[in-house]
Image: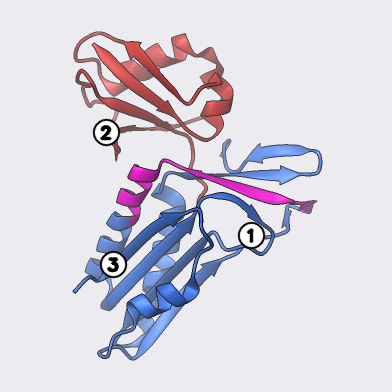
Amino acid sequence: MKIQVLFFGITTDLVKTSQVEILVDEKISIGNFKITLKEKYPELKNINSYAIAVNETYAEEGLLLKDGDVVAIIPPVSGG
Amino acid sequence: MQRTSIKITSEKLDLNECYNFVTDDSCGGISAFVGTVRNDTQGKEVLQLDFSTYKPMAIKEMQNIANLVLEKFDIQKIAIHHAEGMLQIGDVPVIITASSKHRKAAFLACQFAIDTLKETVPIWKKEYFSDGEVWVNAHP
């Protein structure tokens, strides 16, 4: 199934894009998605941690993705 | 009656707008927090800051904070406005105003709102120095 991935902050610089579509297995969890993402973008190992948002809401590791979901990579925020 | 005002803009933030939004005849006080761009980070001169956002989600998260503030504190209205794009020293990236019957709730609401915004709202700033640039907080 197809997932749209958005990168923000330092991760846009690391992977050198802000948006990409990737194909993943049906019902992949966020945790496994992060592993897949790190295989595709080894540069992401250069940040210690990042959060994931699915369809504009923070998501836990166990959440299962659906076809067409928009997954955002959220490095540590620094607004204000 | 609308009790929250949430905004992300590349225009200059307007303290009067935030102030006027929260004024209310039932209130005895208004508290405001105004964030400003500082000229140094750990002794190093900062030239400018670039704020980027995940705008639709950032708006949602700011709205969540405003709703939570209304639940937690005895306040009448709250405005949370944030800037995006390149800001210079002294410019204002964030304004929060809150009005309440008694002053303590307004003070606490502003502090809670800015502290939470800095933890949860998907906004990032890049600091520009004379010799390069750094994403703030990227390696906590």
* CB-based contact (under 8 Å), mark 3 and mark 1: no
Amino acid type at mark 2: Asn
Q: What chain does mark 2 sit on?
A: A
The answer to which quarter of the image holds residue A50 is top left
Determine if residue A45 is in view.
Answer: no
The answer to which quarter of the image holds residue A74 is top left
SS of the residue under disc 3: strand
- Check disc 2: other Cα within 10 Å, few if <14, some if 14-19, many if 20+: some
Q: What chain does mark 3 sit on?
A: B
SS of the residue under disc 2: loop
Q: Where residue A67 sits in the image (x, y, percent)?
A: 20, 18
Find the distance from the CA under tag 3 to the CA under tag 2: 23 Å
Relative to A63, does residue B85 appear above or below in the rendering?
Answer: below
Find the distance from the CA under tag 3 to the CA under tag 1: 25 Å
Amino acid type at mark 1: Val
Q: Which residue is mark 3?
A: B4
**Image: magenta residue range:** B43-62
